[in-house]
Amino acid sequence: MKAPENPTTDDLAQRHINRLAATEAAVEPVFTLPSHYPSGHHVALHRHSRAQFAYARTGVIMVSSRQGRWMVPPEHALWIPAGLDHSVDMLGDVTMLSAYISSEALTALPEVIRVVGLTELARALIVEAGVLAGGGDNSRRRRLITALLLEEISQLPGRPLGLPIPSDMKLATLCRAFLANPTARLLIDDWAEQLNMSRRAFTRAFRRETGISLSTWRQQAALFTALPRLAGGESVTTVAFDLGYESVAAFTTMFKRMLGAPPRAYFRIAEPA
């Protein structure tokens, strides 16, 4: 049996450079590439001229850009617009499949990063597109699968796994400090007081900067902390109390409201077939 490969950081960096070059050189409207990364690997800030649809098969992907941060757990996908500088961190060993889509392939390309849940059809289509990549004998079938994949991508349901960071420096400082030590006990009045603002002025400013309320932002920040820990095998009880929730039930209610399933069921669903 062949020994498992243990690529060095330099090996992985060179692979990424090669992937970018292959993507830029591709002529087909949808260019599909698989990738595998060890836990803790960081892909430095980069961009590509095509939009990227990244499907996380195993592990959790954290993507950061000037627009904010996005968490992509297993069996979810992320839309990254063309030309957007972004970096990627791997939480757990990651296997993903990316479709790089040219501007000519879709008439209306989303201009913001967006996390989506995958349907069974979308998952089957992107996997099959990866199998057929580069195969000249199935060009008609590949075109049909690609067209259906693009149609399905436009219909996928959004997931609240984005965490916008305000452009205002004072608000951003508060947000980044909270991410370093998240808690369920964040109060609007506390942040408003720190910025010498009224509650009304603060809530307006925060929503203007992020597009969501502070309460929703806090819950999404809690998910950003909880998901990699739960995916790594930590108990729901430990994570819930570490985040300051008064009970496991309160944390589970928040988790189910945000992601559509309680933590234990969610990670059973998330296991790849």
Image (cartoon, rainbow, N blue to C red):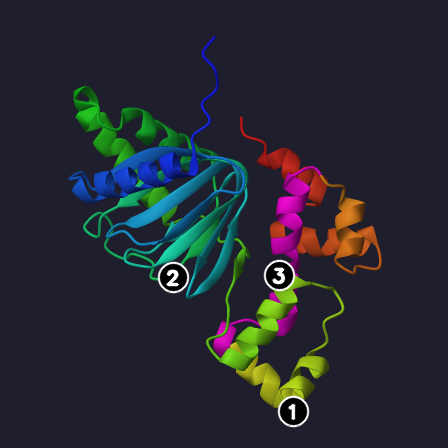
What amino acid is labelled 1 in the image?
Answer: Ser
Residue sticking out furthest to the top? 1
Q: Please tell me which residue lies in front, 98 or 45.
A: 45
Q: CA distance from mark 2 to mark 1?
A: 31 Å
Q: Earlier in the sequence, mark 2 or mark 3?
A: 2
- Name the residue rendered at 31%, 31% in the picture: 129
Could you tell me what secondary structure mostly forms the magenta stretch?
helix
Q: Is residue 195 visible?
A: yes
Residue 239 image point, x, y percent: 75, 50
Residue sticking out furthest to the right? 246
Give the structural element (helix, strand or loop) at label 2: loop
Residue at numbered disc 1: 198
Question: What's drawn in magenta, residue-wise?
Answer: 208-233
Q: CA distance from mark 2 to mark 3?
A: 19 Å
Labelled disc at residue 221: 3
Residue 56 image point, x, y percent: 47, 39
Mark 2 and mark 3 residues within 8 Å of each other at the beta carbon: no
Residue at numbered disc 2: 112
Query: Does residue 124 appear to the left or right of 14 in the view shown?
Result: right
